[in-house]
Amino acid sequence: MKNALFITLLLLTNILLAQTQTLKGTLEQHKGQKITLAGFNYYKVLDLATTVADSLGNFSLNYPKDYKGMGVLKTQDNSSLVVVLTASKAQITGTHLKEADSLQFINSPENNQFVNYAKAYTQAKQAYKAWRYLKPKYTRETTLKTQKTVLKNINKELQRLERVNSNALKLVSKNSYLRWFLPIQTLVNNMPETIHNYRERLPKDIKEFRSINFNNPNFKTSGLFKELIEGHYFLLENMGQNLDSVFTQMNISTDYLINNLKENNSLLNNVSEHLFKYFEKRSLYPAAAHLSNQMLSKNQCVLSDSLANTMQKYKDLKVGNTAPNIQLDATTQLSDIKKPVLLVFGASWCSHCKKEALELLKYYDTWKTQKKLEVVYISLDTDQTAFKTAYQNVPWQTYCDYKGWETQAAKKYYVNATPTYFLLDKDMKILVHPRSLAQVDAWINYKL
């Protein structure tokens, strides 16, 4: 009986091991520490496996057999190392993850190639920066510009360094995961430097992004997806052109993404949701409005209800549209005011609304007397006593039907947070969706 049970357990163990891949290691200075292997699923970070190193620093991590891509090895002392997870039985040895020179990989040629490429990239980048520093000195400074041979050699070395990464890539097998991964990683790493130091690269980096196939399944486990897309839009935001040009370029890239992913509905929905949140976070409202209009016009796109509702707000309430009219009380509509209006949605139970209301008091008299601006405050309160206590002494117009989020005004303006602001002109045209009262004040002073 015992023998039969032992054999059964052994068979089950073998079956489970056959369904996993293994990353083993010996890291002497991480003995007794928790070791975690993390992976990626587009925007998400996954815990693939966790274990504890023994008294000698030995550990073994079993992760899903179907996982191919990049991972991050993490230790309890907050050290980490990016690794290539394409070999079913890889091994790493060394002293500590932070002591890169001590690390060696066994049965994993791609990890060794990855390390070599990283070293070549780092060295070339440092050298390139140094030679770029010297070039203008030998071009413009009187005591140096006579050294034509030196300048010629500087240009020659710069050209060589620009080819280092592509030459290193040729040493990687064409069928290797790294052959796809490294150029994308290099683009991601280069974008911040393009913004700050090498602006002549802008057209190249933009063109390269718009040639990428985002349907490539390698993206799923690359850990690059979010950084690549957000990095590109940050690059466009800081390209040094006027806002109209910036938003035009953003819209071109958005159209490219939507068109590229149009046959991959699930991923397109995922990308559009994260990109929309990114635009809102950075107050890139025209870009958010364009994304919303494009996604809502694509009948084949299946958006989640919450995302579709939020995007509909930008389609219906985009800058330049006529704002929805609302019944303020039994005798007054918003359209009756005939003056510029700051429409505010708030509530007495909202702590941030209370702080903003105190800020609004500082601006109100100046706005009203100098700009003829009216403030219309729609409360989402449901308790009459709380509403009257909070707003009985405010100088602006305040209204409440005690229906909370179900009030028709909130629904017409797709309000899902408080406070929410809309700045309207005297004809109820939407001027801007402000994120703060400071932004309202700046807009009123310079444009209203």
Image (cartoon, helix red, strand yellow):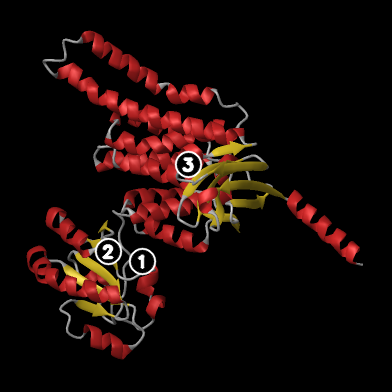
Residue matched to label 2: 422
Nearer the observer, 172 or 103: 103
Give me the C-alpha separation between circle 2 and circle 1.
9 Å
Residue contact at pointers 3 and 2, CB within 8 angstroms: no
Q: Is residue 292 visible?
A: no
Q: Position of residue 194 (x, y in %)?
A: 32, 34
Q: Is residue 91 visible?
A: yes
Quarter placement of the C terminus: bottom left
Q: Locate residue 203: give its quadrant.
A: top left
**Dot 2 alpha-carbon crowd within 10 angstroms: few under 14, some 14 to 19, many 20 or more:** many
Q: Amino acid at mark 2?
A: Phe
From what the image shows, is residue 386 above or below residue 413? below
Residue drawn at (7%, 64%) of the image? 370
Furthest-bottom residue in view?
A: 385
Mark 3–mark 2 Cα distance, whole angstroms, equals 30 Å
Mark before the other along the chain sequence, 1 or 3: 3
The residue pinned by badge 3 equals 257
Disc nearest the viewer among 1 and 3: 3
Q: Which residue is mark 1?
A: 413
Where residue 386 sits in the image (x, y, percent)?
Answer: 29, 87
